[in-house]
Every structure is written in C-alpha cells, then in structure tokens.
Amino acid sequence: MEDLLSVVVCPECQGEFEIEAENFWRCQKCGHTVQVLEGKPIFTPTPETAHIFKRIERGPDKGTPWRQANWRFLESQIKSLDPQAQILDVGAGHGDFADIFTNRRYLSVDIVPYEEVHLVCDLTERIPFRENTFDALVLMNVLEHVYRFHELMDALFRVLKPGGKLFIAVPFMIKIHQAPYDFHRYTHYSLRDIAAQHGFEIQWLEGYYDPIFFMGEGTRNFRFWVLPKLSRPARWLGRGLLMLMDGLMALLSLLAGKPFVKSPEEANNPAAIGYHLILKKPTSTI
Ligand SMILES: [Zn+2]
C-alpha cells in the first residue's frame, strides 16, 4: 500500500493521497476521494460490457507460439533494465507475464478489478500518475483492445520518464478475441506512424512469423466454426480430411523451418502473426 501511495497521485490535481479509511483515500490537496476495494484504488468504473476473463496458467513454454514469443521478448527486455527501475504493466489482466517481474518495482493497472492488479483505471479517461514517473511501461496484447488508442498513447508518453521505454506486443494475423473488446489490427506501417505521432522514438520493431501456426489457424477455424454446421456425414468426411491436413502440415513444417522474429523488411512476408516494439521517450524534447 505504501508503495502504491508513493506512485499514485490525485488525477484531478496531482496532489498526494492519504489513507482516510480502509476503503477510501482522500487527496490532501483538493479533497478528491477515491474508493479502495481490497487494497485497490478504483479510479474509473468497470464498463458493464467489459470482457472479464478467467485466469489461464502462463509461462515461458505455455500458450500459443505467439505467447511464447511474447515471453521471450519481454523477459529479455526486463532483464536489461536497472534493478531499481519502476515498471507499470498496462492492461495487465491476471498478470500473464507476472513471473518476469519478480523482485522488480512493479505495478499493474487494468480497467477490470482483477485480483492480481494493483489499481483500476482506464488511462484514456484519467491519469492517476505524475508526468515522468515510470522507467518502463509494458503493453502486452492490449493495444488492439483499446478503442481510443491515441488517448492511451498520449497517457503513456506522459507518465514515462524521458529515456524510459515502452514495450509493446500487438497481434496482427490473429482472430477476434475477448469480444466485444477487440477493435484494431495494426500493420507495421501504422505502428510506426502512431509511435512517431505521439513523440516516441522507435528503437526496435520486429514481426513474429510462423507460417505453420498461421496455416493451423485456418484449419482450427474450419474445425471449430465450419465443421459443427455441416450435416453428420459431411462432418465425418471433414474430420477425416482435417486429419490428412494435419499430417500434410506436419510434413510442410519440416520444409518451413522454425518460426522466427525479424524486421518486417528483412522477413519480406506480409503475414506477421504479431509485432513487438520498443519505443523510447526522447531524453530531450526540443
Ligand atoms: Zn486532488
């Protein structure tokens, strides 16, 4: 709680909060109060339609190949930070990457009061942090779920220290998920534009390419969304053909080689599964 109070400020006046009671804080400067539920200050209400998902076990070797690539990317970046770096995980959910932040100065924020998050706030609405607060920001598979992503990028730029870094993972060739809170897919061209438009320097942009996983998405789509609608005999035939496809894909994977990360120009493949970016807030703004 003390940790939280040292970083969180009044979104109205940037004043410091004091603990008034177990369930609310009061701004010492303007008197604004914020409700605190189970130790979490709640700055914005959870939208009624918000997709609230169950905890899924995550780890370096768990989940889709894209998730595993996310893990490798983020882990190597967090390792490179100063041990004292203050990190904010934005849209952290259940803390899919929490193990990477063990023994770090780490806070997480989400619009849903998940048990694992430290504070609840929609940063496109209010910003309960001072300018230049964090050394690193983490935005893993979140940007596509934020309708007003320009407002979010403004907020992130504001709370990041000059020289601080924003780590992003964002899917491209991945189906709709967490419906109805899935709004965007960005090409690497638009990601570059968005970063520059909000004042960030692009330190790194890589695509994750996995043609066999991409093909698998096609057969999984057929399996789960087409097959069940077919007549019984057609379903049986479809299942048999899918088994054949799986066999053929296993053979093709021998030719395709391993999935890889590369700059989009180098990869020269128009179907990245997703992108990883490292954006830096410039140290001096002229
Ligand atoms: Zn205040």
Image (cartoon, grey):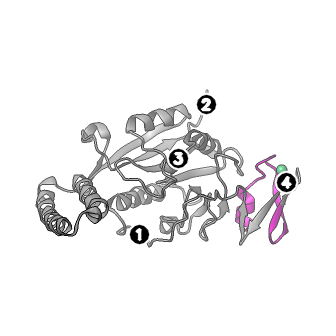
Indicate yes or no whether the magenta region holds residue 256. Answer: no
Indicate yes or no whether the magenta region holds residue 18. Answer: yes
Q: Nearer the viewer, residue 244 or 251?
A: 244
> What is the three-letter code of the residue carrying label 1?
Gly
**In the shown orientation, is residue 8 left or right of residue 21?**
left
Q: Secondary structure at mark 4?
A: loop
Crowd around label 2: few <14 · some 14–19 · many ≥20 (10 Å): few
Comparing labels 3 and 1, the label whose residue is closer to the camera: 1
Whether residues under marks 3 and 2 lie with C-beta atoms below 8 angstroms apart, the answer is no
Which residue is rendered at x = 56% and y = 56% of the image? 91
Residue 276 placed where, x, y %? 40, 48
Whether residues under marks 3 and 1 lie with C-beta atoms below 8 angstroms apart, the answer is no
Q: Is mark 1 within 8 Å of ligand 1?
A: no
> What is the three-letter code of the residue carrying label 2?
Thr
Whether residues under marks 2 and 4 lie with C-beta atoms below 8 angstroms apart, the answer is no
Q: Secondary structure at mark 3?
A: strand
Circle 1 sits on which residue? 59
Circle 2 sits on which residue? 285
What's the CA distance linking mark 1 and mark 2?
38 Å
